[in-house]
Amino acid sequence: MTRTEPMNTRAASRRSVLISGASIAGPALAFWLNRAGFAVTVVEKSAAPRRGGYPIDVRGTALDVVERMGILPRLREAHIDLHRMTFLDAEGGEVASLHPHTVSGGAAGRDLEVRRGDLTDALYTAVRDDVEFMFDDSINSLDETGHGVDVTFRSGGSRRFDMVIGADGAHSHTRRLVFGAEAPFHHYLGYCFGIFTLPNTFGLSHETVMWNTPGRAAALYAVGATEEVHAFLNFAHPQPSFDTLAEPEAQRKLLAEVFADAGWEVPGLLAALRDADDLFFDAVGQIRMPHWYSGRVALVGDAAYAPSFLTGQGTSLALVGAYMLAHSLTARFGDHAEAFAAYERDTREFVTLNQSLVGKGGATLFPTTARALEQRNARLRTLATMPAAEARPAHSALALPELTAAAREATASAEVGSCGHRLLRR
């Protein structure tokens, strides 16, 4: 079977784009650029698409993105539909039990919460037959010339691309190669956290239970009546060294030390942590950069503007940013410099507005003093007697521009489909 080529810019010289990262922003960007006629390659250091992971939110403008991609029905089927969020005091007594949207400011019946793996699988499935994927590989070096970017890969190969896009997360390797060390761009917010899974011996279903003392929080998150739950440990801490962030045993040691005298179910969580093979540990921070591009290289998603989990908007910013970058490149097919500048100009206000949510909502869930914790608990008790809050305006503050005529034609023609699965495994 031969794929039918859209009658648009594909007929002209196809500009080549290398995207580093196959999590969320990378495949979303690949989807739109492929529809617009670009020759897209995605390189990913993992050996395959990452299926697991903790639950994530898709809100506001990001819902418009996934709807335009045609994957919204699939994500609605995967919606977790959390029923309640219960807060406990130091002794394990109930402080308040609320609907999650009351805390998050989400819009009931519209915003989605799905397992991260369900979203990444939907994105990958939408683009895998039309885009070249290089798994188990990564960029080793970048050398920009007047004619493109010469890329060498960890596997030893080398190729030239017209543009390179870093979509490889808050600790982006692409960003380091082009913009330098992470430290000037990483704004630490005062917390560290660890997430892992353990057997659901607690009888939890469609709910979160969170225990707090000043500067420490432990939570159990049950996405359904499943055999496993997600454990979450968050704590206030001076900024850790990068050695701690990179070394799993150092991470486990730090968590054990911080929570050594904690009550509730925490001793059992620490015991499960010793055997957990899926621990994800990181510092809570934001990426703030004066510019998201340099020459023929641009950044998208967490690599450019990670907002931190305290905002609940990391996934949504990745999806919206990918759409906006693709739109700018499509509208200015022959001029990457102009396109990158337009992408930053048209998207930055939305990013800044959502990064500012760090001082609201989620951030107040983790008070660092006894007085602040008492005040938070009093607010939660009040919220328990009130209707859910309206969705935060920041979530929907950006109206997506329409695709250009050429891109719309490409998107429509792409529905013809293809059978060539261009998957490179090393």
Image (cartoon, rainbow, N blue to C red):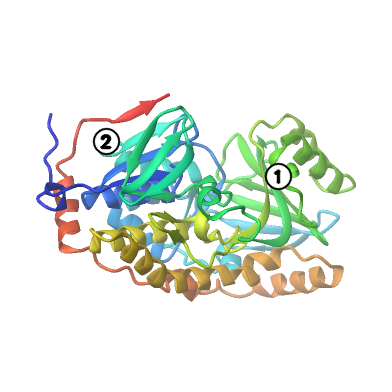
**Mark 2 — residue?**
129
Left or right side of 180 for 364: right
Q: Which amino acid does label 1 sit on?
A: Leu
Looking at the picture, tell me which residue is in the foreground, 289 or 362: 289
Position of the N terminus by quadrant: top left
Q: Please tell me in which quadrant of the rendered image residue 91 appears.
A: bottom right
Left or right side of 167 for 214: right
Left or right side of 8 for 88: right
Position of the C terminus by quadrant: top left
Q: Distance between the residues labelled 1 and 2?
A: 36 Å
Q: What residue type is labelled 2?
A: Asp
Image depth: mark 1 or mark 2 in front? 1
Looking at the picture, tell me which residue is in the foreground, 405 or 18: 18
Point out residue 303 in the picture as x, y percentages from the top left corner: 51, 54
Q: In this view, does 224 lie above or below 322?
A: above
Point out residue 287 in the picture as x, y percentages from the top left corner: 58, 60
Looking at the picture, tell me which residue is in the foreground, 293 or 56: 293
Mark 1 crowd level (few <14, some 14–19, many ≥20, 10 Å Cα): some
**Mark 1 — residue?**
245
Point out residue 161 in the picture as x, y percentages from the top left corner: 33, 44
Q: Please tell me in which quadrant of the rendered image residue 40 appears.
A: top left
Tag 2 secondary structure:
loop
Q: Is residue 299 above or below residue 375?
A: above
Mark 2 crowd level (few <14, some 14–19, many ≥20, 10 Å Cα): some
Point out residue 360 in the picture as x, y percentages from the top left corner: 63, 72
Instruction: Answer yes or no: is residue 109 visible.
Output: yes
Tag 1 secondary structure:
helix
Residue at x-position 19% and y-position 52%:
411
Count of numbered tags? 2
- First in sequence, mark 1 or 2: give its number: 2
Instruction: Answer yes or no: is residue 122 visible.
Output: no
